[in-house]
Image: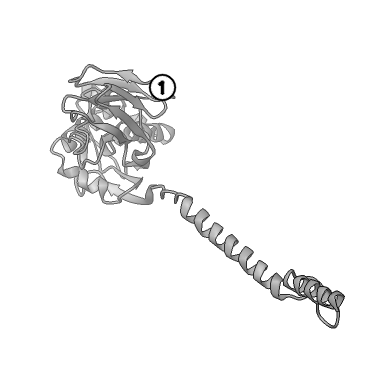
């Protein structure tokens, strides 16, 4: 009798453990289901925690386009070529195909009071380097358009530091802005949202992307900084916010893909 009770007890334990306790010799699934359910629950919980713990990737901003822009609207540029001691002229309506974060940006440049004067004088200076025959010829005309593009792009798409509408404005958060020499000497032309100035107004250090960290005294109007590739940006720190420590975007808001002269009138 005692042996029978012991056997029944052992059978009961075997069933609870998922062992062989059924009349037909099959394994009981009740305990297995409980165990499986617990594992699934742990896996599900672990998956949720893993998703919650994984930081979401920031969406990288890229240029939109291409689109077209006429530099002077319905207006034209008139410049004097080399011929006859600059007494002759060329007249045309330049336009370009471009890409930008905001396709309305080129049109908005007209609100900058310095923009059109700087653009006209720069294009006229480039025109004065060519003769009429060079401009009207085939290969040389392509060279002419390429040189106009090279000098026009930094004016249409200047370097910005921080969240500014104009390149000459102060970044509202840090107080930084573009230095005086950027237009003439700066060599950096990278996309705005891809590059950073790392600023520490407490330690008085400044770093451009992964370039060398440099020290500043405070109050500089035209401090030269380099990225890891030797490209240069000039920074005005004269209004840097006291105690500011952080990163500020730096770069251009778009690029010219190709400049078109259109029909050129020579006189």
Picture quadrant of residue 199: top left
Q: Quadrant of the C terminus?
A: top left
Q: Residue furthest bottom?
A: 23
In the rendered view, would you say 7 is above or below 195? below
Along the horizontal axis of the image, is 22 left or right of 150? right
Taking depth in this image into account, of 79 and 17 the one nearest to the observer is 17
Q: Residue furthest front?
A: 2
Along the horizontal axis of the image, is 18 left or right of 265? right
Q: Which residue is mark 1?
A: 230
Taking depth in this image into account, of 44 and 8 the one nearest to the observer is 8
Taking depth in this image into account, of 56 and 180 the one nearest to the observer is 56
Along the horizontal axis of the image, is 228 left or right of 244? right
The image position of residue 22, as x and y in percent, is 81, 80
Q: Residue furthest left?
A: 113
In the rendered view, would you say 45 is above or below 5? above
The image position of residue 185, as x and y in percent, is 29, 22
Badge 1 marks a residue whose secondary structure is loop
Taking depth in this image into account, of 76 and 96 the one nearest to the observer is 96
Within 10 Å of disc 1 (Cα), the crowding (few <14, some 14-19, many 20+) is few
Q: Residue at x 39, y 39 (%)?
A: 194
Q: Residue at x 78, y 71 (%)?
A: 14
Along the horizontal axis of the image, is 222 left or right of 58? left
Q: Quadrant of the N terminus?
A: bottom right
The image position of residue 211, as x and y in percent, is 40, 24
One can see residue 185 in this view: no
Picture quadrant of residue 19: bottom right
In the rendered view, would you say 255 is above or below 13? above
Picture quadrant of residue 10: bottom right
Q: How many marks?
A: 1
One can see residue 25 in this view: yes
The image position of residue 63, as x and y in percent, is 38, 47
């Amino acid at each position: 009798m005692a042996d029978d009770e012991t056997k029944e007890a052992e059978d009961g334990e075997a069933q609870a453990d998922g062992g062989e306790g059924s009349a037909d010799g099959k394994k009981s699934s009740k305990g297995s289901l409980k165990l499986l359910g617990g594992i699934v629950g742990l896996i599900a919980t672990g998956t949720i925690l893993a998703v919650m713990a994984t930081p979401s990737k920031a969406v990288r901003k890229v240029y939109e386009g291409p689109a077209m822009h006429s530099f002077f609207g319905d207006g034209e540029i008139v410049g004097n070529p080399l011929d006859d001691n600059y007494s002759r002229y060329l007249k045309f309506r330049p336009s370009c195909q471009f890409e930008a974060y905001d396709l309305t940006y080129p049109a908005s440049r007209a609100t900058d009071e310095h923009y059109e004067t700087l653009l006209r004088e720069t294009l006229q200076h480039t025109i004065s380097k060519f003769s009429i025959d060079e401009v009207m010829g085939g290969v040389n005309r392509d060279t002419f358009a390429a040189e106009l593009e090279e000098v026009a792009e930094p004016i249409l798409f200047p370097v910005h530091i921080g969240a500014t509408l104009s390149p000459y404005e102060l970044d509202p958060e840090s107080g930084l802005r573009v230095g005086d020499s950027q237009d003439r000497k700066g060599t950096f032309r990278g996309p705005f949202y891809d590059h950073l100035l790392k600023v520490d107004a407490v330690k008085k250090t400044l770093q451009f992307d992964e370039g060398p960290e440099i020290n500043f005294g405070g109050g500089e109007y035209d401090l030269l900084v380099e990225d890891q590739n030797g490209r240069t940006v000039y920074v005005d720190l004269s209004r840097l916010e006291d105690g500011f420590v952080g990163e500020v975007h730096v770069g251009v808001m778009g690029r010219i893909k190709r400049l078109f002269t259109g029909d050129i009138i020579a006189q």
